[in-house]
Amino acid sequence: MSINKENLESINKEYWLNRAPGYSEVNKEELEGIQHQNWKEYLCKQISERYPGTQPSEISILDVGAGPGFISIILAEEGYNVTAFDFAQSMIEEAKLNAAGLADRITFVQGDAMKLPFEADRFDVVFSRNLTWNLPHPDKAYDSWLRVLKPGGLMLVFDANWYTYLIDENKRAEYEKDRENVKLSSLGDYNIGENFDTMEQIALDMPLTHKLRPAWDMEYLNSIHAGEVSSVLDIGSILYSEKEKINYCSTPMFLVKVVKG
């Protein structure tokens, strides 16, 4: 049964505000695991190819939906000028703790990802991971992100068709198979935990649960003439740990890449 749409936004916000400590533990696992190097190498390569010969300190990056700070932290380690942006103050506080000595090198901002508070053409790079699926108006988010991105700037959006199994019987079977394989691996299941059923109910009312992605993203971005738009359908095969590959086998992470026109 889906959630009353009038209450969807407040229930979603409450969920993520309360999720901060648990989500922070996942970020800590990433910081200590192979993901740390995988993501750093990949992102630095993408950025340096877009801005060859430019020092990291001269490149401004907006991490939208930064959560407990994983991406902001690894980019700050490399000397980039990073702004960590999240709607949940509890996530920002976790990010500051996880950043430790790097916290002073990261700008932390709380606000709405669908209506960014920054001036136009502010950032060289806009980054987002596992956020767009959870937005009631992803089109408005893309509009806002492109507004603050400099002409010729780089937008990197990582996400997945996370909850397709709620509306597709074949994907449900694949998802259940993932759960079985996780048990056999004894590595731990990311898809169980406190209030997970609440997140499923929220997801049913999110528009992108009912869209095939990244096809939807590319179609929208091309329709607004965002620039040079491309995608990678299974970027998780490069970035994920073995635990993540088993957990998310039926839900590969994709990348949508835009060079702003």
Image: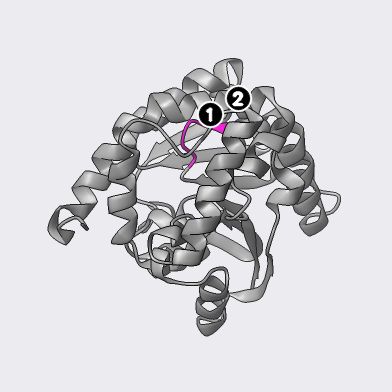
Residue 84 picture location, percent across and down: 50, 38
Tell me the residue at 58%/57% (across/down). Answer: 157
Residue 107 picture location, percent across and down: 50, 33
Question: Can residue 6 be seen here?
Answer: yes
Magenta stretch mostly in which secondary structure? loop
Judge by depth and name the residue closer to the eye, 168 or 160: 168
> Does the stretch in magenta take in 179?
no
Q: Residues within 10 Å of mark 1 (few under 14, many from 20)?
A: some
Q: Quadrant of residue 240?
A: top right
Which secondary structure lies at badge 1? helix
Pointer 1 with pointer 2, Cβ within 8 A? yes
Tell me the residue at 69%/58% (across/down). Answer: 234
Judge by depth and name the residue closer to the eye, 34 or 218: 34
234 left or right of 193 in image: right
Tell me the residue at 84%/54% (across/down). Answer: 52
Provide the residue designation for mark 1. 26
Q: Give the number of the disc on residue 29.
A: 2
103 left or right of 58 in image: left
Which secondary structure lies at badge 2? helix
In the picture, the quarter occupied by the N terminus is bottom left
Residue segment shown in magenta: 66-70
Question: Can residue 145 be seen here?
Answer: no
Residue 74 picture location, percent across and down: 67, 32
Asked if 254 appears above or below 70 in the picture, the reply is below
8 left or right of 131 in image: left
Tell me the residue at 52%/33% (across/down). Answer: 189
